[in-house]
Image (tube, rainbow, N blue to C red):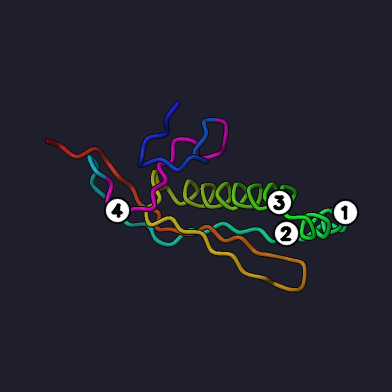
Amino acid sequence: MTVPALHASADLASRPGAGLLLSTSDVLQGHRIVEVIGLVRGNTIRARHLGHDLVAVFKGMFGGEISEYTKLMAESREQSLDRLRAEAVARGANAVIGLRFSTSMVMQGTSEILAYGTAVRIEEAQV
């Protein structure tokens, strides 16, 4: 199954705001923006797990992907997107454009994942 270019892969039917269109683009082909609602965001801060740190030390010595951290970051991105969707839907949006992610270290062993974009109301363009 392929995901249409305008939909983020995280836009799954079982998630809150499933009908919300997410796009990294500022222009949505075939649609026109009828209202700009404004900035929406969702974030999460996660701490590393001591057990995962021990696994990471061994993998660092011998090489290879640290899959425990890959999974942690993927879950964090999804949670940030879920929170962004919830805010956008609560504000009456049916799309978010200019979607971006940012990450930063908050303190030793913790990272923040932030998803942000512009909430808009769109409609199909009349041809």
Q: Are marks 2 and 1 in contact (CB under 8 Å)?
A: no
Q: Which residue lies under the disc numbered 3?
A: 64
Front residue of this view, candidates 121 and 54: 54
Mark closer to the observer (4, 1):
1
- Residues in magenta? 14-28
Q: Which residue lies under the disc numbered 2?
A: 46
Residue 59 falls in which quadrant of the image?
bottom right
- Separation (CA) of disc 4 from disc 3: 47 Å
The amino acid at mark 1 is Gly
How many residues crowd around disc 1 within 10 Å: few (fewer than 14), some, or many (20 or more)?
Answer: few
Q: Are marks 4 and 3 in contact (CB under 8 Å)?
A: no
Mark closer to the observer (2, 1):
1
The amino acid at mark 3 is Gly
Residue at the (29%, 53%) spot, across then down: 35
- Separation (CA) of disc 2 from disc 1: 15 Å
* Residue 103 x, y percent position in the rendering: 59, 65
Mark closer to the observer (4, 2):
2
Q: Residue furthest top?
A: 1
Front residue of this view, candidates 23 and 89: 23
Instruction: Examine the structure image and report whether residue 35 is included in the region drawn in magenta.
Output: no
Mark closer to the observer (3, 1):
3
Q: Does label 4 or label 2 sit earlier along the sequence?
A: 4
Residue at the (87%, 54%) spot, across then down: 51
Element type at mark 4: strand
Q: Are marks 4 and 1 in contact (CB under 8 Å)?
A: no
The label number, if any, that marks residue 51 in the structure image: 1
- Separation (CA) of disc 4 from disc 1: 48 Å
The label number, if any, that marks residue 35 in the structure image: 4
Task: Say which quadrant the N terminus sits in.
Answer: top left
Q: Does label 4 or label 1 sit earlier along the sequence?
A: 4
Element type at mark 2: strand
Q: Does label 4 or label 3 sit earlier along the sequence?
A: 4
